[in-house]
Image: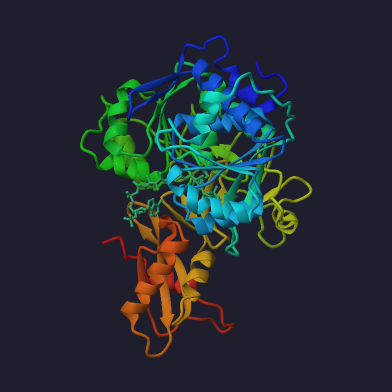
Amino acid sequence: MYDDNYLANVLRQGSYGHDSDVFAYQVDSGVNTNYAQLFNQAERLAAVLQQQGVVSGDRVAVQVAKSVTTVQLYLATILVGGVFLPLNTDYTANEVEYFLCDATPKVLVCDPNLFDDLTSVANKAKVTAVLTLSEDGGSGSLVDLMHTVTGNCDVVPRQASDLAAILYTSGTTGRSKGAMLSHGALASNATTLADVWQFSRQDCLIHALPIFHIHGLFVAINITLCVGASLQFLTKFDPEKVATLMPNSTVLMGVPTFYVRLLKTDILNKQLTSNMRLFVSGSAPLLTETHHQWQAVTGHAILERYGMTETNMNTSNPYHGERKAGTVGLALPGVDVKICHPISGEELPAGDIGQIEVKGPNVFSGYWNMPQKTAAELRTTGWFLTGDMGVCDEQGYISIVGRSKDLIISGGYNVYPKEIEGVIDDVQGVVESAVIGAPHPDFGEAVVAVVVASKGREQQQLQRSIREKMGLTLAKFKQPKQMFFIDELPRNTMGKVQKAQLRAQYQQLFMS
Ligand code: MLC
Ligand code: AMP
């Protein structure tokens, strides 16, 4: 056991004494990893990190494909008292540069194909070592070093308040913010969720989410680890494959797009899902219609829950009891949730719409290097202002009715318009732009750009220049699915761009 290391101890508890149990079955390669192998290799990777000079509090940045080795690297970082910093594999070198310069990690682990590009970026951020890990997790300099280390790592003692991870979340101003998550925040949420969702060693979770966000990494993997359950590990979401795994699995966690796409397969039915005991949805709104269709086809009511990078999970529909479609359920045990007037901050009664505020052991410790942002959003009383607008019914069920932040959620990924507008506006020949989210049948919302070109500028050529610039600077999921040119942006009397009017105008764009 890792008694002194708070989070590692919690994550080890469920499998302790059951080391031959399977942790992950890798669906693509057919390889099984049991708990002994998981932790033995994590300890050896921890020894590599120590050899590279990682000491407690050092950040370990990771932009690699999803593999069991990536999970072991996460555990290794925790064991040495480091701070795990996962990065979306879709981020361009340009985007990675910002994260490295802001978080100044000691080590960066990246894909071997990106080594040259990212080494020059890492040098700017004074990263001490750039190591590589291949797509299948089986080779690269990290693995080579692991084969040469002799002796064990020294597990570094950590308390509940010590940092375990930093995850970047997009910011309203266009600059991403690093949410600092403590050992205590991650451990408390994992044990609470395992308890309320009734996880046990007998569970087998279909894991098709990316592992650079809290949903796939902390919600799915931490819960699995803390009870010693197992995973059907897919490198990416494929509806047909996920459906065929259901007879040998018990739980699926996904974003709403998973459920929309699964419903489109013609193999889903009550018999195929009869071994499954729980379908969880989150990260974006699940349409009531999808909830009802799922129930009609499979007989299961999807359990919708609500969380954020800064807070892990806050609310959940009940495991036993009514799962109300269109709501994100009740506050989790130990988590306080209230609906407040967005300006006065006064708590509002049931039925009134206001900003959702959250307090509890799950809440983050602040934004990395951003004391002012932290003070603006995380009160000294411990209440965190989520920027989500919600309403609570008489029974305590919360519904999210909008966002006070100008945020687009596309297939579970967050996109802040300001960042995209900044990139477009920088292109020569652009006067200004407005980026909005339009309803999309697959992604929930899709990014749309409305651009004003300078007089006489040829639009097709300008569109090409904008796309080229975006290709170099923005991850694919952030790039607008459609771009329109108009003569001027609609403005109110104060001169503010009327995004609501644009959203209304493009409401049906993808829906016909
Ligand atoms: C991929 N693309 C996207 C996209 N994902 N575009 C917009 N939004 C997305 N989410 C791009 C691709 O690059 C491709 O571009 C085109 O869209 C079609 O891609 P696809 O093949 O359909 O996408 P796919 O690879 O199948 O991915 C879709 C997805 C994936 C929904 C399975 O995006 C996904 O796994 N999302 C989960 C995100 C997640 O884990 N969120 C949790 C955040 S934590 P082109 O140009 O090449 O065609 C959080 C807190 C909480 O929110 O509460 O959980
Ligand atoms: P992220 O910053 O990526 O962690 O995304 C967090 C945001 O996702 C929240 O602030 C919500 O706006 C949104 N979100 C998460 N779960 C749900 C849900 N079940 N329904 C609606 N929105 C959700």
Give the image's coloring scheme. rainbow
What residue is shown at x 73% (from left), y 35% (from top)?
Answer: 162
Residue sticking out furthest to the bottom: 456
Q: Is residue 267 left or right of residue 282?
A: left
Q: Is residue 373 visible?
A: yes
135 left or right of 264?
Answer: right
| 312 vs 192: above or below | below
Outermost left residue: 266
Residue 52: image x %, image y %? 64, 35
Q: Look at the image and tell me in which quarter the N terminus lies.
A: top right
* Snapshot quadrant of residue 139: top left
Residue occupying the point 56% across, 29% down? 193
The residue positioned farthest toward the front in the image shown: 148
Q: Looking at this rendering, what residue extends furthest in the right direction?
A: 380
Which residue shows up at 48% across the image and 72% down it? Answer: 499
Which of these two is toward me, 419 or 285? 419
> Up-down: is 358 above or below 196?
below
* Residue 181 percent across, percent down from the top left: 66, 40
Q: Is residue 284 left or right of residue 358?
A: left
Figure check: 418 above or below 233: below
Q: Please indicate, yes or no, whether residue 317 appears anywhere in the rendered image.
A: no
**Whole-percent x and y of residue 40?**
55, 19
Report which quarter residue 86 is drawn in.
top right
Query: Which image quadrant: the C terminus?
Result: bottom left
Specify whether 75 is left or right of 379.
Answer: left
Residue 88: x percent and y percent?
Answer: 49, 47
Q: Nearer the viewer, residue 352 or 315?
A: 315
Numbered label tally = 0
